[in-house]
Image (cartoon, rainbow, N blue to C red):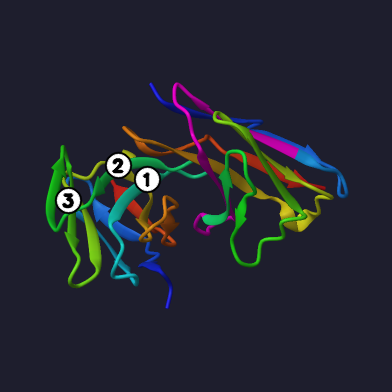
Amino acid sequence: GAVVSQHPSWVICKSGTSVKIECRSLDFQATTMFWYRQFPKQSLMLMATSNEGSKATYEQGVEKDKFLINHASLTLSTLTVTSAHPEDSSFYICSARDQDSGNLFGAGTRLSVL
Amino acid sequence: QKEVEQNSGPLSVPEGAIASLNCTYSDRGSQSFFWYRQYSGKSPELIMFIYSNGDKEDGRFTAQLNKASQYVSLLIRDSQPSDSATYLCAVTPPGFQKLVFGTGTRLLVSP
């Protein structure tokens, strides 16, 4: 069945480095994927909408140069956190819409920036 | 006004009781409404979705939608300790596929 696979599930990095998170749709194609961020005890906040073959649409207040999104194929979107800092430490979750199953979520990536 | 509002809780109910979770939304044109359950440190999992006014039942869960009043609720019958989690209400704004989430209601079911 349709599944959204997200990798890695957990990453620790040094301040100033870049981290790439992958989101894949399995058994379905996703022209649109969504990237959310969740801080502890808070809800999911949409960061950006990733569109296959075109530029991502960022939500207000999200720096597009810091959070680079690439959606090069119908089954893969990547989020790169550039020059990560401790305040970027969060739980990042991707989502894709399958026409039969609705909005499916990846397992999430917990980013810790030291 | 937030787009989707929920009481943060915690809502505490004894095992076997009915838990009632509520959510209001601001965009009257919203078409799709979802309830997700999220355990600590995990990704949300879909419980139910509802598009039309009225009730929709699935096992122990019933979603209720009232578009005129702009609220959607989730009833959990025969609550179990394993139901203890944060329940997120999500709405699809008109013309979009994205989900806008409420802050979630934490449910605690005591044995």
User: Residue B56 at x, y = what percent?
Assistant: 14, 47
Three-letter amino acid code of the residue under disc 1: Arg
Query: The numbered mark 2 sits on a residue in which chain?
Result: B
Tag nearer the camera, 3 or 2: 2
Residue drawn at (86%, 44%), measured in percent from left and top? Answer: A17
Badge 2 or badge 1: first in the primary sequence: 1
Tag of residue B17: 3
Q: Is residue B42 visible?
A: no
User: Residue B59 at x, y = what percent?
Assistant: 16, 37
Residues flagged by tags 2 and 1 on a common chain: yes
User: Residue B9 at x, y = what percent?
Assistant: 37, 64
| Circle 1 residues within 10 Å: few <14, some 14–19, many ≥20 | many
Three-letter amino acid code of the residue under disc 2: Ile
Relative to B93, A95 lies left or right: right
Query: The numbered mark 1 sits on a residue in which chain?
Result: B
Q: In the rendered structure, are the residues bearing label 2 and label 1 in contact, judged by CB atoms less than 8 Å apart?
A: yes
